[in-house]
Amino acid sequence: MPTETATPVIELRHVDKHYGPLHVLQDINLSVAKGEVLVVIGPSGSGKSTMCRTINRLETIDSGEILIEGQLLPQEGKELAALRAKVGMVFQSFNLFAHKTILENVTMGPIEVLHTPKAQAEAEAMELLRRVGVDTQAAKVPAQLSGGQQQRVAIARSLAMHPTAMLFDEPTSALDPEMINEVLEVMVELAQQGMTMVVVTHEMNFARRVANRVVFMADGQIVEQNTPDEFFDHPQSQRAKDFLDSIKGH
Amino acid sequence: MSANVSMRDALYEAPGPKTRRRVAIGTGVSLVLLVALIAFVIRQFYINDQLNPKYWSFFTRWTTWRFLLRGMFGTIKVALMAGVIAMALGLLLMLGRISPNKALSAACHVAIDLFRSLPSLLLIYFFFLVIPKYGIKMPAFWMITVPVALAASGVLAEVFRAGVNAVPKGQTEAAMALGMTHGKITRKIVLPQALKIVIPSLVSQLVVVVKDTTVAYVVSYPDLMQNARVLISNYDALVSMYFVVALIYIAINYATNQFSIYLAHRQGTQVISRTSENPI
C-alpha cells in the first residue's frame, strides 16, 4: 500500500471551475501518492472527466491550485509544456496522430520533446509496442488498427515519455465490448508495475481489482472516497448507493 | 468509391418508380430545349452573318494559333505564379491569424479581410497607376501577377484556416499532452493534416486566379485575353474570336478542376480513415 507521507505526485487544492452558470468543479481537494491507482467514477456530467483534464491543464481552472510533484502547474508556455511531458494522458477517442505511422506516433514525443536520438527512440518505441502487444503493426497508420489496438498504442505513446503519472480519461468507453479487456490488461500490468494512475472509468471490475482508492464524484463534487471494497460493499452516501444500484443491472 | 456517388447517396434517397419517370420526362424536355437553344443560336449567327467564312477562315492559319497559344502561356504563367505566391502568402496570413500573439493575429485578420474584399481590378489599378507615381517601376508581368496574388491570398488564407479547423481537436490535445509547444504542434501535427484536407480546394481556387488574370489587358500584358483583342482588331472578328477564347478558358479551367478532383480522389481513403479514427 502506498503511503502519503512523501510529496504527492498529483495534488488538487480547492479547485473550482465554471462553464458559464454551471459549477462543474466545486472545491475539489485530492492528492495522489506515488504508485497509487486512483479510480474516479460517477454519473455522466459529474465532472470526473473535466477534473482529469485539469491535471495537465487541457482544461483551465477558475481558482485553486494544482501541483505536480509539489510543483505548481504553470499556466502557459514552455514551462507548462515541460510539466505536461511528465504526465501521460490516454484519451477516450485514442487521438493517435492520423498522418503518422504507429511507430512514429510513439517516437514523436521522445524525439520532439525529449530530443532523444531517433535510433534510440525507435528502439524504445518498439520495446513498448511489444509490451502492449502491437509491435507487428508498427509500420501501419492508426486507421488500419482496431480500436483496442489503437488505445494500446496510445498507452505506449504516453509511456515513451517516461511519465511520473498517467491520466486515463475513460480509456475504454469508445471501444467495442470485445476489445475492452485487451486495454484493461495493459492497464492492470501498468498498475502492478507501480505506475501512478488516475483512471476515469465505468469499468467497476477494473476498479475493484486494481484501484487503491475509489473517488466517487457527482455534480462537480467529490462525494466520497474509499478503498474499492469498502466503497462498493458499503457506500456511505445516498448518491453513491443510487449510482451503484443503477449500474448493477448489467 | 467515387466522392460524387457517396455524396449523392448521403444526400438523396434512392429514387422510386414515380421519381424515375419524372426524372426521365425532365431529361427528355431539357434535351429538346437544349437542342432548340443551340439551333436558335446558330440561326442568330447565320442571320447576323457571323457564320461568314471571313470571320472563321483565319483560324486555319498557324500564325493565329501561335499568337493565341502565346497568350495562353502568358495567362498560365501569370496564373501559376500568382497561385504560388497566393498560397505562400495565404498560408503565412493564416498562421499569423491563428497565432496566440494577439497583435499579429489581429493584423493578419485585417489583411485577410482587406484582400478578400478588394476587387482585383482595383488592386491592379493601384499597382499600375499609383505605385509608379512613387518611382517604383514594375514589369507588366508583375503588375498583373502581384495584385491577382494578393486578392487570392485572402481567400486562400480562409481556405487554409478551414483546413486547420477541420483537424480534430483531439490531435492537438494529444500533442499538448506530450508536452509539445504551439509552434511544434502546428508544424508537426496540424498543418500536415490540414494541407491534405484543403489541397483539392486550393487547386480549384486556381480557377478564380485564372479568371482574374483576364484583366491583364489593363497593364498591356500579353495574356490570352489581350492577344485575342489584338486579333479582333486585326481581323474585325469579335464574336468568333471571343467564342474560341471562351472555349480555351473553359478548357484550362476544366483541366484545373479535373486535377483537383483527381487530388481529392487520390486522398479519399485518407480523408475517410481520418473520420473513422475519431468516431465522435
Image (spheres, rainbow, N blue to C red):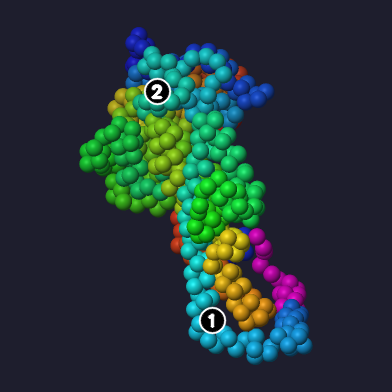
Residue B223 location (% of width, % of height): 54, 67
Label 1 sits on what residue type?
Thr
**Residue that lies at the very extreme toward the bottom in this rendered image:** B53
Image quarter in which the N terminus of chain A is found: top left
Which residues make up the magenta segment?
A: B11-27
Is residue B268 among what the camera can see? no
From the viewer's perspective, tell me whether residue B269 is left or right of residue B108.
left
Q: Which residue is mark 1?
A: B64
Q: Quadrant of residue B246?
A: bottom right
- Residue B215 left/right relative to A58: right
Asked which secondary structure carries label 2, the reply is helix
Q: Which mark is residue A46?
A: none
Three-letter code for the amino acid on which mark 2 is drawn? Glu
Q: Quadrant of residue B238?
A: bottom right
Kind of element beneath mark 1: helix
Residue at 49 percent across and 47 percent down: it is B89
The quadrant of the rendering that contains the C terminus of chain A is: top right
Q: Residue at x 61, y 61 (%)?
A: B218
From the image, give the main secondary structure of the stretch colored magenta: helix
In the rendered image, residue B193, in percent from the top left (x then y), is placed at 45, 48
Q: Disc 2: which chain?
A: A
Q: Position of residue A224 (x, y in %)?
A: 53, 16
Picture layout, residue A218 above or below residue B24: above
Residue A52 x %, y %: 48, 26
Residue A79 bears which disc, if any?
Answer: 2
| Distance in Å between CA atoms under marks 1 and 2 | 68 Å
Q: Residues within 10 Å of mark 1 (few under 14, many from 20)?
A: some
The residue under the point 72% across, 78% down is B27
Instruction: Please name the residue shown 62% across and 43% down the image.
Output: B113
Q: Nearer the viewer, residue B192 or A108?
A: B192
Label 2 crowding class (10 Å Cα cut-off): few <14, some 14-19, many 20+?
Answer: some
